[in-house]
Image (spheres, rainbow, N blue to C red):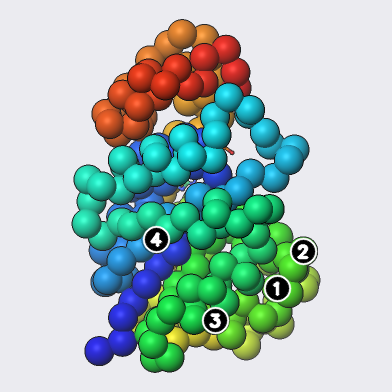
Amino acid sequence: MPKKVGILGGTFDPVHIGHLRSALEVAEFMLLDELYLIPAARPPHRSTPQVSALDRLAMVELAAAEEPLLRVDDRELMREKPSYSIDTLESLRSELAAHDQLFLLLGWDAFCGLPGWHRWDELLQHCHILVLQRPDADSEAPEALRNLLAARSISDPLTLQGPAGQISFIWQTPLAVSATQIRALLASGKSARFLVPDAVLAYIHAHGLYRGAN
Ligand code: ATP
């Protein structure tokens, strides 16, 4: 049987229940064997210097430890500079069997920005793309993606065929949580309890993270 592997990238600064519920729901719906959370090396313009890449990684590991379907992959943080998705996909693909299915999870906004990504036209050689779309969104794809969608999109994500090459949509209501909101709460001395797993909150407090920064 081909393995079914999902990947969700993000800065995870910090990881929160929005990321975790979304990842878990997709993993269960798509019958994935595992879903990798892949913390990104932070681009220079987003730096919040008091939270290191290792702290972000440690928090994602604590969160994923509670759920067997979720795994953590540190390959982007272990590189010296921010990675292109194509590099991450090539690297992951080299570790899988040729018939294994790889699913890249992208929010609608990220998907619309795809034509600006490095070697974007090669992404589908390595994975399928699952676009996470809000049920209430009435968004139209940019011109540059229309032909691709016409050629590659499949209406039922459960019928995506083969190891890579197709696009499908998953309709999902995101929890109204963002890392920006959590950083702001913590910076102003308020609680982030119930927005992040307890183990992540304990790590944040033990390491004095996000105090006076957002
Ligand atoms: P920030 O507020 O710092 O921009 P964020 O909360 O959006 O951060 P990211 O690490 O940038 O978190 O997000 C990683 C991925 O998780 C992205 O694909 C993003 O669309 C998705 N995501 C973020 N928040 C939610 C949420 N509440 N529900 C579902 N998916 C989410």
What residue is at 51 percent from the left and 59 percent from the top? 75
Q: Is residue 1 above or below residue 120?
A: below
The dot on residue 36 is 4
Name which residue type carries label 1. Trp
Q: Secondary structure at mark 3?
A: loop
Instruction: Tell me where residue 33 appears, x and y as whole percent.
Output: 27, 71
Instruction: Tell me where residue 120 appears, x and y as whole percent.
Output: 70, 73
Quarter holding the N terminus is bottom left
Task: Name the residue tied to disc 3.
Answer: 126
Q: Is residue 21 above or below residue 152?
A: above
| Disc nearer the start of the sequence (3/4) | 4
Cα distance, mark 4 to mark 2?
A: 24 Å
The quadrant in which residue 162 appears is: bottom left
Task: Name the residue tied to disc 1.
Answer: 120
| Disc nearer the start of the sequence (1/4) | 4
| Disc nearer the start of the sequence (3/1) | 1
Q: Secondary structure at mark 4?
A: strand
Instruction: Tell me where residue 59 appears, x and y as whole percent.
Output: 39, 38
Circle nearer the viewer, 4 or 2: 4
What residue is at 37 percent from the left and 18 percent from the top? 205
Q: Nearer the viewer, residue 24 or 50?
A: 50
Name which residue type carries label 2. Gly
